[in-house]
């Protein structure tokens, strides 16, 4: 595997009001790849695949997205800044006049999906990772699901992340941010034995309650309390304590609120209404999906995987990587990198 020493970093000013921190690999002027991370991650989450893509002949760009890491210029108190179409604008402005192969993981997958949907002229293709993108919503969500979940002692993590309590719950948890993130990453990885995902039948409390508690939480627990009992004995081979410290130090500095604002926008009716207006649009550029085979994110929204394949009109396949959970590009970087390069080369021929 090419060395991480082939990755450089810089800051880009004037990106939709941001000073954006960016990691790069490969040679400028080569075909461009844009990598968008999710929660609770950073551009650093791509560190293992970036050298591989650079060695394969691509200029690779991975930013700390709005609200994360060393990127500055955002205001966590201004929710509108974190609406997903504004985050799409961040990505488009960062590219300048370049056209790229677009890749998004976790919440970055939703950003990538909406970017492909609304700005297709800027991208050769889109790779959606871990979180399926089934297209824009057609209606406001039925809030009765929360009442039904509460009756059985559960609550949905995305709505919990949208509450003001979520940030201090994690930032000031008794175990500390480093230990919280260690347990959180472990519990969503292939290392956690209970991650044996399967399709759920419907968006009902009974079916959603089958999800692990990091997705559908116990009603009276916060996320730090949810993952604490699953703290592993030591560091993971795919995420050492030194590597984890990069994330912990970043979130200790910035807090979680700005990154949680992404969730708040996706659960707030006035923002959802703006996305409903895009309902008739489809993703027309070449698209594929990559996830770890042990990732419950594939099925956490029942039917979304099938909706994604219908919403993407130039579909190039679903790839589930054995031995990986939610953090597929960190758990299995060589397999992820190979799939990405194969896809880029296929759509460029």
Image (spheres, grey):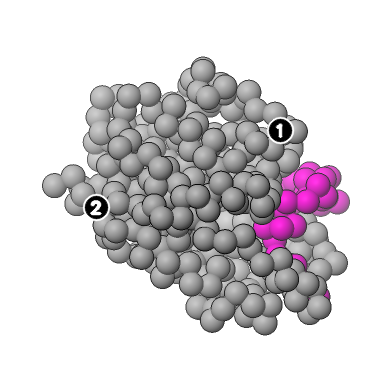
Q: Residue at x 39, y 47 (%)?
A: 117
Tag of residue 88: none
Residue 323 in sight here:
no
Quadrant where the N terminus is found in the figure: top left
Residue 273 placement (x, y as % from top left): 59, 50
Q: Is residue 323 above or below residue 208?
A: above
Residue 103 placement (x, y as % from top left): 39, 46
Q: Earlier in the sequence, mark 1 or mark 2?
A: 1
Tag of residue 78: 1
The one of 208 and 212 positioned closer to us in this rendering: 208
Query: On the image, numbered disc 2 is attached to which residue?
Result: 342
Q: Disc 1 versus disc 2: distance between alpha carbons?
A: 40 Å
The one of 349 and 176 positioned closer to us in this rendering: 349
Residue 38 placement (x, y as % from top left): 55, 47
Left or right side of 286 for 219: right
Depth check, mark 1 against mark 2: the one in front is 1
Residue 187's image quarter? bottom right
Q: Secondary structure at mark 1?
A: loop
Residue 332's image quarter? bottom left
Range of magenta residues: 153-180
Q: Residue at x 55, y 68 (%)?
A: 301
Left or right side of 82 for 54: left
Q: Is residue 91 above or below residue 200?
A: above
């Amino acid at each position: 595997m090419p060395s991480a020493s082939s990755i450089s970093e810089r800051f880009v000013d004037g990106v939709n009001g941001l000073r954006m921190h960016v990691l790069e690999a490969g040679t400028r002027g080569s075909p461009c790849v844009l990598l968008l991370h999710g929660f609770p991650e950073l551009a650093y989450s791509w560190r293992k695949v970036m050298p591989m893509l650079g060695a394969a002949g691509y200029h690779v760009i991975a930013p700390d997205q709005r609200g994360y890491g060393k990127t500055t210029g955002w205001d966590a108190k201004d929710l509108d800044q974190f609406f997903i179409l504004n985050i799409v604008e961040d990505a488009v402005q960062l590219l300048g006049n370049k056209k790229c192969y677009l890749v998004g993981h976790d919440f970055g997958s939703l950003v990538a999906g909406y970017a492909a949907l609304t700005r297709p002229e800027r991208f050769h293709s889109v790779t959606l990772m871990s979180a399926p993108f089934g297209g824009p919503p057609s209606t406001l969500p039925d809030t009765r699901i929360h009442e039904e979940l509460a009756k059985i002692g559960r609550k949905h993590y995305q709505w919990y992340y949208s509450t003001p309590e979520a940030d201090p719950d994690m930032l000031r948890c008794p175990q500390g941010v480093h230990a919280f993130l260690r347990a959180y990453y472990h519990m969503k990885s292939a290392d956690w034995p209970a991650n044996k995902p399967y399709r759920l039948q419907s968006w009902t409390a009974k079916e959603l309650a089958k999800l692990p508690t990091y997705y559908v939480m116990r009603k009276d627990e916060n996320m730090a309390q949810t993952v604490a009992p699953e703290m592993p004995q030591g560091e993971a081979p795919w995420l050492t304590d030194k590597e984890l410290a990069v994330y912990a130090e970043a979130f200790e500095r910035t807090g979680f609120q700005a990154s949680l604002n992404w969730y708040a926008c996706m659960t707030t009716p006035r923002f959802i209404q703006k996305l409903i207006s895009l309902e008739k649009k489809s993703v027309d550029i070449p698209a594929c999906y990559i996830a770890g085979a042990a990732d419950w994110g594939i099925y956490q929204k029942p039917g979304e995987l099938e909706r994604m394949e219908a919403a993407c009109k130039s579909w190039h396949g679903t790839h589930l990587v054995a031995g990986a959970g939610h953090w597929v590009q960190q758990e299995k970087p060589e397999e992820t990198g190979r799939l990405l390069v194969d896809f880029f080369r296929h759509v460029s021929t």
